[in-house]
Image (cartoon, grey):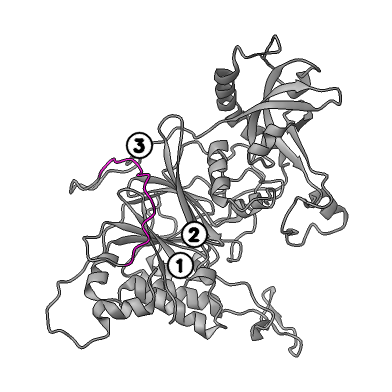
Amino acid sequence: MVTLDEIAGTGLLQKPSGESHHLLERSDSNYKPLDSFALPKDRQYQQQFADIYFLRLTKIKPAVEEIASTAWEGTVLGGETATKVDRVLDVRQGQLCWVAGTVYMDMPLKPSVLEDVSKDRWISAPTTTDYYFSSETGGESLMLEDDSGRIRLVGNVLKDYFLVTGCIIAVMGTENANGEFEVIDLKFADLPPQPDRWALSKPPSNGTAKTSKVKDEDVEMTGLSGSQPSKKIAIVSGLEFSGTDTSYDMELNLLLEFLLGEALGPAAQSELSQISRLIIAGNSIAKPSDHDPSTATADKKNHKKYGYDSSSYNPVPSQLFDTFLSSLLPTMPITLLPGILDPANASYPQQPIHAAMFPKARTYASLPGSEPAEPGWLDTVTNPWEGEVEGWRMLGTGGQNLDDICKYVDSEDRLGMMEAMCRWRCSAPTAPDTLWSYPFQDDEPFVMKECPHLYFVGGQPEFGTKIIEGPEGQMVRLILVPSFAATREIVLVDTETLDVSKTLRVCCP
């Protein structure tokens, strides 16, 4: 953790030494974004959402069945051999068998789209609730479904796993007299194949690139050191520019000066010059508050122009964010993901924030209409986003997918839920049931076709990280990126080992 008191000890608050310092240069960024979640320009919304579930089941079911077949083939219980059943409705009472399908959870507090439409709530924002389960009323039921039908799952083994609507699993057991499937064991697809480092781009010609594996080491929470720094990627989320809190505006300025190296001594500046890229993971604009003068319209006449209420619109947050970006971009490339609070479409996957929101910073964006599109220093991307940074395959989101999963599970283990998404091979399993999404027909982009080396989720209550391993040697670094507005923290990732070398706290004394 680094505070202003520690910064004062770096030599900044003293008279000039008279010593000459060599000119520092920012490390280059090797970067290749992927358009995995880009929607077509002429997208339509007349189609049904059922295709998403069928596509997801078609893509993941073969991997689940392969793992289940390897684990359960020849299994004998009570003198009966477990057999594979192709469809849910082919399960027979008393028969020991296993079947694969999609999980569906019926929960008492889960919002219903059909109910919203019947009560003329279909044009409003999505209904929100803290949790979908109820510890008081109960009534939750877990089912397995495919294109043939649905069967209810019961059994104590289900309590040992994170399960939500939309994940693909295989279960072994037998149907009881009540028509329920008694689950004895459960399998899922596990991590998909992982590409090698530098699979999409060429490594630097200086010979410094390595193909090392992700290191499974403890997170180093040290302060600034005088040792030779390695190349870093900075990840921040939840900047929440508002323009109404002067003390917080000061801390945002401190963050800007920290990233630019203007508030630190020569040793720290040398280390921070190794930050090759900044990734902003959603929620850069704050939600309007009730006491915001720009939203108080009780004593103002409504004057609508070009379809919006000019008396309540507050341009200050976007202007401050634009100034923040334009101050950083001359020295550092930025990847910008939208979040639930940002001016982007609400449904998943969110499309990039329009460049018109950044009249100053868009100078550093790619030229519109350029083919093939070369990413500019300001790369406004989708949420979720997938790309290759310094040769590592990365997957990141603004946090809506994880926040929605947390509503299904009575647990605070967010890293465990991130791991479960990777092992389900699906980055947004609850879409479109409770997480609003585009009705895909030809592809299901939330299915993880390739295993990332690093998976980060923004907008989280607190920082967390760990390494998970797959059956074929895959290793994934998971990172919970905390909201800067709540914690004043950013995350630095080492580009050679993917170790989270430190979490820096930028705050006023």
- Where residue 388 sits in the image (x, y, percent)? 38, 47
Q: Is residue 225 above or below residue 351?
A: below
Q: Residues within 10 Å of mark 2 (few under 14, many from 20)?
A: some
Residue 489 bears which disc, if any? 1
SS class, disc 3: loop
According to the picture, the residue beneath numbered tag 3 turns out to be 196
Q: Give the farthest residue toward the bottom.
A: 299
Q: Quadrant of the N terminus?
A: bottom left
Q: Quadrant of the C terminus?
A: bottom left
Magenta span: helix, strand or loop, mainly?
A: loop
According to the picture, the residue beneath numbered tag 2 turns out to be 463
Q: Which label's residue is closer to the chain start, 1 or 3?
A: 3
> Is residue 360 shown in magenta?
no
Q: What amino acid is at disc 1?
A: Glu
Which stretch appears magenta? 210-223
Residue under the point 82% across and 59% down: 121
On the question of residue 469 being in view, the answer is yes
Q: What amino acid is at disc 2?
A: Phe
**Camera-side residue: 480 or 94?**
94
Count of marks overlaid on the render: 3
